[in-house]
Image (spheres, rainbow, N blue to C red):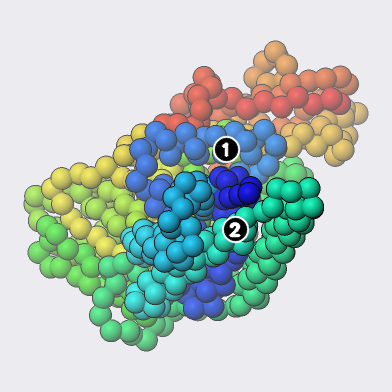
């Protein structure tokens, strides 16, 4: 008699065919009822517990791959992370099932006991529900979420064992006539695997389709929220009008927009999906070394408890942005100066730092000395004249002039005044503690199809941006090939906190040319010319482009 038993390759294939629809079922339930989306929770949990160097290596590798394929970091980074998260979860399912089949193949007593598959499912379910609960992104009762996760993983484990049994006929005759029967059994196994693959694909496609069609926004109470729900009177959306600047330099066609449409504003954070915080139950406790602990709600900001709001045009950049990258945007922030709020809380003399926690597990600290020295540091509740969107930090985020985005938490849930500093999330992972924005200039366009004629001379307009945080830009210069540096024209910026658009009309000269740009900040300091990657202080170096005209 010849016996056939599935091997680890069959296990890997089965793991793939069972884990993919498992992902789809988790997605549908997440969209329909707000239960945890386990693949995303696993990815975010690993990003929080893995060593900082390993996390940064992964980020750097992803950025290099996207750059190699000439993809926009702003547009492609989140989809890339999503694919990585789904691939990671699928790989775990493949490996677990392969190991499971390896054990079953060698332990005959448990091959037909479906209780073993159930135990595997329970163990996996417990591990993943603990991970999901630590991330905390669910809007239904914890008991329902736990039961759902356990049931799906139990079903997953039992199906593994069931497939093993379907692939394992007891015996096959070895006689000549029996060989044909054995081959038929082989064909039946292949047919079964094809049917299993079809069922897996159908469940996955149907699940993805249903999840995409469901248009619900489950309310979620942020970590740290407390108290009963209140009526939230959100401010009415406003029309943002750019300041008039008579005689301002005209931007070159092809230069990025001076004011970034909100839907195009870059988003970089530690989440695959943003926290959905219920504004009605959200509270901001301000505690620690204060004379008057406070608990604020959204109305305290929107209804001007702390006086008239501040409106600032701001350019925000990510510290991981390359010199000419697109992780930089400009919009109008509306909020309350943090000085006013701390004045009401009354910090004790021993207080030195403001420790900030966010609803996504992010944390950062701000020196009180910095807050006292700059009234522009604000808690913002509106962007572009609209209440903050969930992906951009609803209900509250902080703005600190002259700092990269890594120092500016979103989805804020608690403040604590402390005598001791606490390194921020990215500082603990090897990035710069201060994260001051570097002076940077970029060539956006050499408009070879927009030739200008003036005084019998043809000119090609060159345009781009320059920024230096809150220090402003005093001068931009352009070099053509190895020639002298020539000063460009600067467009009056939207504010002292935004980038500056510049243009340089270059006298046309046919051939291949290299254009290089450099800038000086408002204090007259030239940007750092030496090239350095973003980590850990922010990218430096001069940007150049080669043009054939």
For the residues bearing labels 2 and 1, Cβ distance under 8 angstroms: no
Q: Position of residue 481 (x, y in %)?
A: 73, 16
Residue 170: numbered disc? 2
Rendered position, 388 above or below 297: above
Name the residue at 77% across, 45% down. Answer: 253
For label 2, the SS is: loop
The residue nearer to you, when weighing 34 against 425, is 34
Residue 63: numbered disc? 1
- Say which quarter of the image contains residue 307: bottom left
Name the residue at 43% across, 39% down. Answer: 55
| In the image: residue 32, left or right of residue 71 | left
| In the image: residue 58, left or right of residue 197 | left
Mark 2 residue crowding within 10 angstroms, few (<14) / some (14–19) / many (20+): few
The residues bearing labels 2 and 1 have C-alpha atoms spaced at a distance of 52 Å
- Tell which residue pokes out farthest to the right in this image: 456
Q: Position of residue 377 (x, y in %)?
A: 34, 54
For label 1, the SS is: helix
Name the residue at 37% across, 86% down. Answer: 231
Q: Position of residue 282 (x, y in %)?
A: 33, 74
Residue 208 is at least partly visible in this image: yes
Rendered position, 536 above or below 412: above
The residue nearer to you, when weighing 279 against 487, is 279
Name the residue at 70% across, 48% down. Answer: 174
- Say which quarter of the image contains residue 543: top right
């Amino acid at each position: 008699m010849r016996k056939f038993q599935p091997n680890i390759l069959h296990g890997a294939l089965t793991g793939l065919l069972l884990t993919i629809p498992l992902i789809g079922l988790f997605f549908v339930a997440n969209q329909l009822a707000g239960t945890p989306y386990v693949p995303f929770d696993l990815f975010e949990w690993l990003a929080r517990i893995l060593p900082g160097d390993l996390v940064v290596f992964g980020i750097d590798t992803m950025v290099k791959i996207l750059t190699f394929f000439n993809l926009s970091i702003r547009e492609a980074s989140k989809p890339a992370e999503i694919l990585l998260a789904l691939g990671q979860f699928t790989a775990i399912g493949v490996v677990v099932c392969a190991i499971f089949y390896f054990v079953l193949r060698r332990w005959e007593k448990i091959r037909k006991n479906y209780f073993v598959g159930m135990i595997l499912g329970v163990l996996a379910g417990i591990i993943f529900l603990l991970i999901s609960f630590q991330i905390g992104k669910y809007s239904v009762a914890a008991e329902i979420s736990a039961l759902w996760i356990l049931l799906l993983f139990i079903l997953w484990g039992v199906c593994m064992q069931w497939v093993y049994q379907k692939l394992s006929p007891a015996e096959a005759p070895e006689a000549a006539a029996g060989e044909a029967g054995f081959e038929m059994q082989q064909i039946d196994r292949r047919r079964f695997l094809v049917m299993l693959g079809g069922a897996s694909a159908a469940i996955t496609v149907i699940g993805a389709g249903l999840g995409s069609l469901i248009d619900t926004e489950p309310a979620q109470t942020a970590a740290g929220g407390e108290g009963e729900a209140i009526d939230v009177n959100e401010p009415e959306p406003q029309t943002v009008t750019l300041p008039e600047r008579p005689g301002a330099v005209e931007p070159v066609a092809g230069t990025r927009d001076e004011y970034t449409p909100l839907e195009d504003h870059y988003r970089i954070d530690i989440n695959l999906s943003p926290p959905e915080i219920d504004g009605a139950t959200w509270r901001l406790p301000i505690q620690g070394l204060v004379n008057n602990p406070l608990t604020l709600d959204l109305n305290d900001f929107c209804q001007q408890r702390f006086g008239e709001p501040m409106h600032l045009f701001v350019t925000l950049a990510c510290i991981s942005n390359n010199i000419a990258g697109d992780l930089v945007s400009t919009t109008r922030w509306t909020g309350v100066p943090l000085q006013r709020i701390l004045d009401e809380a009354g910090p004790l003399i021993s207080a030195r730092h403001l420790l900030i926690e966010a609803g996504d597990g992010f944390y950062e600290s701000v020196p009180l000395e910095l807050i006292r020295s700059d009234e522009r540091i604000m808690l913002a509740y509106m962007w572009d004249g609209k209440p903050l969107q969930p992906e951009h930090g609803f209900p509250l985020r902080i703005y600190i002039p002259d700092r990269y985005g890594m120092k500016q938490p979103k989805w804020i849930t608690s403040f604590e005044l402390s005598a001791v500093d606490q390194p921020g999330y990215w500082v603990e992972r090897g990035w710069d503690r201060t994260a001051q924005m570097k002076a940077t200039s970029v060539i956006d366009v050499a408009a070879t199809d927009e030739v200008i004629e003036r005084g019998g001379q043809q000119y090609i307009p060159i345009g781009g941006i320059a920024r230096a945080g809150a220090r402003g830009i005093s001068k931009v210069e352009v070099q053509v090939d190895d020639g002298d540096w020539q000063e460009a024209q600067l467009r009056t910026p939207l504010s002292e906190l935004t980038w500056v658009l510049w243009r340089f009309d270059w006298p046309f000269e046919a051939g291949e040319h290299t254009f290089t740009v450099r800038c000086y900040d408002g204090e007259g300091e030239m940007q750092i010319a030496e090239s350095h990657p973003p980590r850990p202080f922010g990218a430096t170096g001069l940007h150049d482009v080669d043009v054939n005209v």
